[in-house]
Image: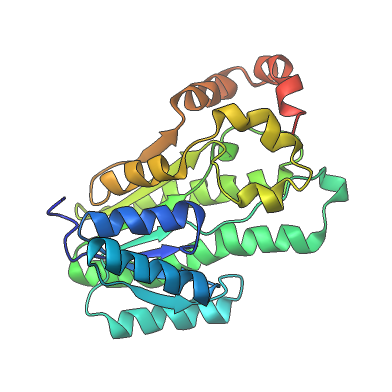
């Protein structure tokens, strides 16, 4: 058990499933106290019971729709009032829709930016003064390799992840505190329910099935870097190497990977 996580209270958005659920399990396993945010009260209650039974760990539930700014403000202010100190915020909640841009529904675009970008920015803005008061904290933003590699059918989703990665890098420079850390987690495809909404036909999911990351491993690696000066976590490694080549040789990489990109 990591001594630096024992009794630390860590907010996790999108905690009811996928990566968020695994993050809460690994936080509890390491001795931390998850503060779990999601829309599904039933799934959060089930996870809370699991954390108690498996790890004898307390946790807290806050039901919230992060697409509604009034609810974002209300829940974060309540958390800070009800807990003497919160030690970290993991902005994990996210949504994606993969469609050709001209065919995209405006509601889908708006929802992606509200959940992937605006809620994370607003929660960070509200929690930073709290971290500064205690001179301790960590903000982890779950971004994506889509922030680094542009692909067809992900114009809005990729733009939202470009935005959160740019925000994360700027915030890191502005805070400049030795005990307040800011980390971006850039992931390739992860084996979660994300694709049931993002890729309803399943064509992209089938094309990347063998490359998909295990959400348990993603969570384990992320939690292992809490309260450390880690700029970025990039998974899988080979995709990060691809993103570097893409930045150097974008035209060449788009031609080479055109058939793979168009499988989405």
- Residue 116 is situated, as x and y percent measured from the top left of the image, at 57, 57
- Residue 228 is situated, as x and y percent measured from the top left of the image, at 23, 46
Residue that appears at 77% across and 64% down: 107
Q: Using residue 261 as the reference point, say whether residue 116 is left or right of it.
A: left
Question: What colour scheme does the image use?
Answer: rainbow
Q: Using residue 172 as the reference point, say whether residue 33 is left or right of it.
A: left
- Reply above or below: 117 against 38: above
- Residue 31 is situated, as x and y percent measured from the top left of the image, at 20, 59
The answer to whether one can see residue 89 in this image is: yes
Of 130 and 6, nearer the camera is 6
Q: Using residue 182 as the reference point, say whether residue 245 is left or right of it.
A: right
Residue that appears at 32% across and 79% down: 80
The answer to whether one can see residue 225 in this image is: no
- Reply above or below: 108 against 42: above
Splitting the image into 4 quarters, where does residue 243 fall?
Answer: top right
- Reply above or below: 150 against 260: below
**Direction front: furthest residue:** 53
**Direction left: furthest residue:** 3
Q: How many marks do you count on the picture?
A: 0
Of 240 and 245, nearer the camera is 240
Residue that appears at 69% across and 29% down: 207
């Amino acid at each position: 058990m990591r001594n630096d996580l024992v009794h630390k209270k860590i907010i996790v958005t999108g905690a009811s499933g996928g990566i968020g659920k695994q993050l809460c399990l690994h936080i509890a396993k390491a001795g931390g106290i998850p503060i779990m945010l999601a829309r599904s009260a039933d799934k959060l209650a089930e996870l809370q019971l699991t954390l108690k039974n498996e790890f004898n760990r307390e946790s807290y539930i806050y039901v919230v729709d992060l697409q509604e700014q009034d609810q974002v403000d209300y829940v974060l202010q309540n958390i800070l009032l009800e807990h003497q100190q919160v030690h970290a915020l993991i902005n994990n909640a996210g949504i994606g829709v993969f469609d050709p841009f001209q065919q995209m529904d405006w509601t889908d675009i708006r929802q992606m930016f509200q959940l992937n970008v605006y809620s994370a920015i607003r929660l960070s803005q509200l929690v930073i003064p709290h971290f500064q008061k205690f001179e301790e904290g960590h903000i982890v933003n779950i971004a994506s390799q889509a922030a680094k590699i542009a692909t067809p059918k992900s114009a809005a989703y990729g733009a939202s992840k470009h935005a959160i990665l740019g925000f994360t890098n700027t915030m890191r420079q502005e805070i400049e505190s030795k005990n307040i850390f800011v980390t971006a987690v850039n992931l390739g495809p992860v084996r979660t329910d994300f694709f049931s909404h993002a890729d309803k036909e399943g064509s992209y999911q089938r094309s990347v099935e063998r490359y998909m990351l295990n959400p348990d491993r993603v969570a384990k690696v992320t939690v292992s870097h809490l309260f450390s000066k880690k700029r970025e976590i990039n998974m899988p490694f080979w995709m990060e190497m691809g993103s570097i080549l893409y930045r150097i040789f974008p035209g060449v990489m788009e031609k080479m990977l055109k058939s793979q990109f168009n499988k989405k």
